[in-house]
Amino acid sequence: MDFSISEKMQTILEMMKDFVEKELIPLEPELLKGNERSLLPIIEEKKKMVKQMELWAPNHPKEYGGMGLNLVEHGLVSEVLGRTPLGFLVFGCQAPDAGNIEIIHKYGTKEQEKTYLKPLIAGEIRSCFSMTEVDQPGSNPVLLDTTAVKDGDDYVIDGHKWYTSSADGAKFAIVMAVTNPDETPYMRASMIIVPTDTPGFNLVRNISVMGHSGEDYFSHAEILYQSCRVPQKNLLGGEGQGFVIAQERLGPGRIHHCMRWIGICNRVYDLMCQRALNRVISPGKTLASKQIIQAWIAESAAEIRAARLMVLHTAWTIENLGVKEAREDISLIKFVVANTMQKVIDRALQVHGGLGMTDDTIIAYFFRHERAARIYDGADEVHKASVTRRILKGYQGKQIK
């Protein structure tokens, strides 16, 4: 297992890190004001700069204008871009578009690729993924109330979704809905492309999350589908394949998230160390002189490095052996890295004291918005239960001496 990278990849990472530090982090104070839409023109300018540098869409296929990096390489990219909330968006590899691109590329028809995939990869449009429902557990995607009923050549979709991230301003949604109610639980649902200007697609609101509703890309919507009619040709893959496609989408997606979280860890760790060295607490002494602060810094360093290696190992396994062989690892990194990030953010905030509670640094933003990491894509408890079942199954019938 070799995580060494080529000189070209090292250059790419250095270029990206330099861009993040010089071009994106200085934009954060405007983002923290809560008026995200005001940033859109300058975000578009930064996207053009990234394209000119030939760093656009690192994980997407070369034939459609991406860089075509493999999963391990994109994991390393995610670590760099994750240092700022603007990183993935400006470089064209943001969720939920990244996952939607992957499944349209694999399951989409030629017409769907032309209409949705190419402009999505080019950054000309955005999309959203509409699976989580208000009255059903988000960690169990086989439990869905939303239905898509055939009527002539169309599907008529009815249902109530929420946490449809980035729906505000998106051109289309990929909706998970029950098309085959009499099938087995894992074959009941399908994925269907729904343009957001379709009658019956009703964006009710951007949900207030930790006191902020957000705008455009930086939002999570509640959506009501009311007799929303789309042609059956908008089906992705085959009928009843929704659960299978969702699982394929989530595996690599968790690598992106986890390495983004490592990037967040590195950012707040840097801020914590800087604060410890510079914050005077008495004549001639700084926070860094306190043993408990030293312990937090050492523990954070060890935990970040351990989590990082776990994610890179999982990415390598998916890349070389497939998602099925990496199922245990995918569950493990999901809760380990999310909790590592929570601990490091909390320590960094504590070291900053009252300053950490303000939006004068990025720490409070991460504290608010990344708490959800332990919930979305499967709550911690679900992953722990799932991975334990698989682990114990391997011990059945064995005699351990």
Image (spheres, rainbow, N blue to C red):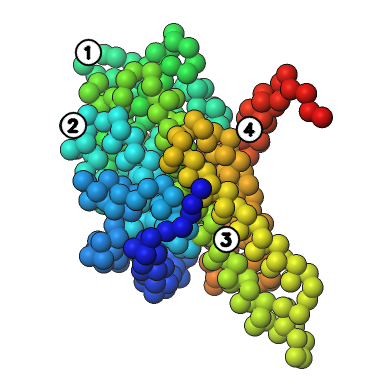
- Helix, strand or loop at mark 4: helix
Q: How far apart are the alpha carbons under marks 1 and 3?
A: 52 Å
**Residue sitting farthest toward the front:** 401
Instruction: Name the residue: 48% across, 12% down.
Output: 184
Residue 273: horizontal and vertical position, in percent?
63, 74
User: Which numbered dot is residue 110?
Assistant: 2
Residue beneath disc 4? 387
Q: Nearer the viewer, residue 30 or 120?
A: 120
Who comes first in sequence, dot 2 or dot 1?
2
User: Which numbered dot is residue 265?
Assistant: 3
Q: How far apart are the alpha carbons under marks 2 and 1?
A: 23 Å
Q: How far apart are the alpha carbons under marks 1 and 4?
A: 44 Å
Instruction: Indicate which label's residue lies in the foreground, 4 or 3.
Output: 4
Instruction: Name the residue: 64% across, 64% down.
Output: 301
Q: Is residue 115 above or below residue 32?
A: above
- Helix, strand or loop at mark 1: loop
Instruction: Indicate which label's residue lies in the foreground, 4 or 2.
Output: 4
Q: Label 4 is placed on what type of residue?
A: Val
CB under 8 Å between discs 2 and 3: no
CB under 8 Å between discs 4 and 2: no
Q: How far apart are the alpha carbons under marks 4 and 2?
A: 38 Å
Residue beneath disc 1? 152
Q: How far apart are the alpha carbons under marks 2 and 3?
A: 40 Å
